Image (cartoon, rainbow, N blue to C red):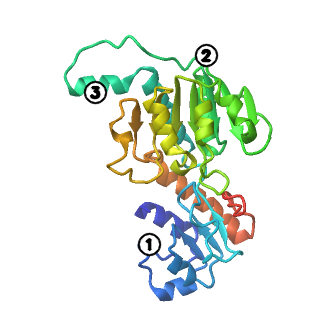
Amino acid sequence: MESRHEDRLKQQFPQISFVTGKRGELPQSELEEAVVYVGWPTDDEIRAMPKLQWIQLPSAGADGYVSNPALREQVVVTNSSGVFGVPGAEHAIALMLAFTRQLHVHFRQQAEKIWKRNPYCLEIQDSTVTVIGMGDIGTEICRKAKGLGAYVIAVKRSQAAKPEFVDELVVTADLGEVLERSDFIVSALPMTEQTKGLISAELIKKMKKGAVFINVGRGGTVDEAALIEALQNGDLEGAGLDVTEIEPLPNTSPLWSMDNVMITSHAVGVTPKKADRRTALLVANFEKFLQGEPLTNTVVRARGY
């Protein structure tokens, strides 16, 4: 956290004693008195904080905390959902547009100083875009895809009211049928016990031939071997992967050298506004915490997010 954000918190909450330090290096004496932890505490730190009531995670994902045996059930965990919606959606749309205009082809030609017009391209307008996962990022992707003129299908864990910028809202059980008619498939799934491997080999085989697959969620939600096979066979047009099953992606992975794959190294959360948004969320939650009110973005541990 930048010093200006620390100063804001100290000025706004003079009744609170703030201690800063690197993860895993905080003094034992401070941990023993800690009531709130902002960051990603280690298991040892969690065990060393008997008075802990609340953990504010800087990430939208709560992987490693929802089922952590070191974390007492009464400790509230909140995530930073809302911070990454805009950059996450813009990242997904950027990958989609890159494939529509075949930018990956032009980048390779530029590196080799080849001036050659590519006669092939795609369009998002009037295409069918399916977004799997309707959290902060997924919702923004739907909104922006609709703004580009796409027919938008949203996939949620359970049925809910359909936003006006979504043409169809279906549940996960209907995903197979939806994939068969989707030109662009965007996964914005969190990593939970329910979503692990959800985009299976069976579902990948059902994807429309020539579709583009984008993943800005979690790599472990996809059967990566099946995805690679579909890309190698030409069943899919291409894949834009911000996340992979193992990160960093091993040098031995064929994904690195595939012409129809773009890899962006888990950069979806990079934004110049991240610190400001995190601090605004933290301020709002501190105010609620001090008033004994429910906190924004409270993670339901049984659900995984």
Q: Residue at x 63, y 75 (%)?
A: 69
Instruction: Name which of mark 1 and mark 2 comes first in the sequence.
Output: 1
Asked if residue 33 can be seen in this view, the reply is yes
Image side of residue 182 versus residue 99, left or right:
right
Q: Residue furthest bottom?
A: 29
Residue 210 horizontal/vertical position (percent): 52, 22
Q: Quadrant of residue 14?
A: bottom right
Helix, strand or loop at mark 2? loop
Q: Position of residue 129 (x, y in %)?
A: 61, 27
The residue type indicated by label 3 comes to Arg
In the image, taking residue 52 as reference, residue 122 lies left or right, namely left
* Alpha carbon separation for disc pair 2 and 3: 28 Å
Q: Which residue is mark 1?
A: 23
| Residue occupying the point 58% across, 40% down | 201
Left or right, 3 with respect to 227, comes to: left
Look at the image and tell me whether residue 163 can be seen.
no
Q: Residue 171 in the image: x percent, y percent?
A: 75, 39
Q: Looking at the image, do the residues carrying marks 1 and 2 touch, with CB atoms under 8 Å apart?
A: no
> What amino acid does circle 2 point to?
Asp
Q: Which residue is mark 2?
A: 126
Mark 1 Cα shell of 10 Å, populated few (<14), some (14-19), many (≥20): few
Confirm or deny contact between disc 3 and disc 1 (CB under 8 A).
Answer: no
